[in-house]
Amino acid sequence: MMEKLKNFPFMLVFVAYLGYNGYQYYNFTTATDGQVELHKVEMTTAQGDIDGLKKKLEEGKKFMRSLDAKRAEIQTQSAKLNEYQGALSEAPDVASLIKLLLTEAKKLEMKVDQIEPGKKNQREYYLEQEFKLQVRGSYQQIVLFCARIAQLQRILRIEGFDMKISPNAISSRAVTLAGNLSIRAYQYTLSKEDQIGKDKK
């Protein structure tokens, strides 16, 4: 028995065993259908999915930033529109406009000989109200009156203007001029869009 064991090729069996294990390890790590390769494919696929989700998330954040910027722009434009509407005024009020013009003339110690509301012209979004004024004062007073009218919060525009020396002086310190002015006031009127928005409130 011992003689047979001595002649048994242990070394050959051991080498064969190592070769078999080496083949199994090689097959496990490099074969296309091996567990390692399958795991690598799964990891690559998962990484691709993660990268795709990251890209979509970044696109979503970019869209939200763009949306916030657009919302801020709309709010700014809406505030400007409200400001313009306030300057134009919704309700036509000829009496208050006449009072406004008389007040400005009185501040400059000018004489208003005549103030006459003219025709009204309805436009798509606003109403034009014309006024004819006959005033007396010095050159500086009349020019300053026109400048003050242009700076009022209400939108008024001087369409026509002429001056000549007046025979009826109001001051001995300066030459009195008679001025004829044509002024237009602009008043906001509700558009169809504004009416729809107002009805929804």
Image (tube, rainbow, N blue to C red):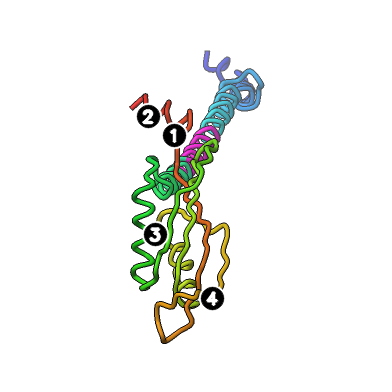
Q: According to the image, label 2 marks what residue?
A: 198
> Percent x, y for residue 9?
62, 20
> Percent x, y for residue 81?
45, 44
Secondary structure predominantly adopted by residues drawn in magenta? helix
> Percent x, y for residue 75?
43, 43
Counting residues from the N terminus, which is met first, the one under dot 1 or under dot 4? 4
**Which region shows up in magenta?**
55-70
Distance (Cα) linking label 2 and label 1: 9 Å
Question: Which SS class for mark 3?
Answer: helix
Question: Which SS class for mark 2?
Answer: helix
Distance (Cα) linking label 2 and label 3: 32 Å
Residue in view at x 50 percent, y 70 percent: 178
Asked whether 166 or 77 is in front, the reply is 166
Identified by mark 2, the residue type is Lys
Residue 14 visible, this orientation: no
Q: According to the image, label 1 marks what residue?
A: 190
Distance (Cα) linking label 1 and label 4: 44 Å
Nearer to us: label 2 or label 1: 1
- Cβ–Cβ below 8 Å for labels 2 and 3? no
Residue 173 visible, this orientation: yes
Q: Is residue 140 magenta?
A: no
* In this picture, residue 153 sits left or right of residue 21: left
Q: Is residue 69 magenta?
A: yes
Counting residues from the N terminus, which is met first, the one under dot 2 or under dot 1? 1
Distance (Cα) linking label 3 and label 4: 22 Å
Counting residues from the N terminus, which is met first, the one under dot 4 or under dot 2? 4
Q: According to the image, label 4 marks what residue?
A: 165
Q: According to the image, label 3 marks what residue?
A: 101
Identified by mark 3, the residue type is Leu
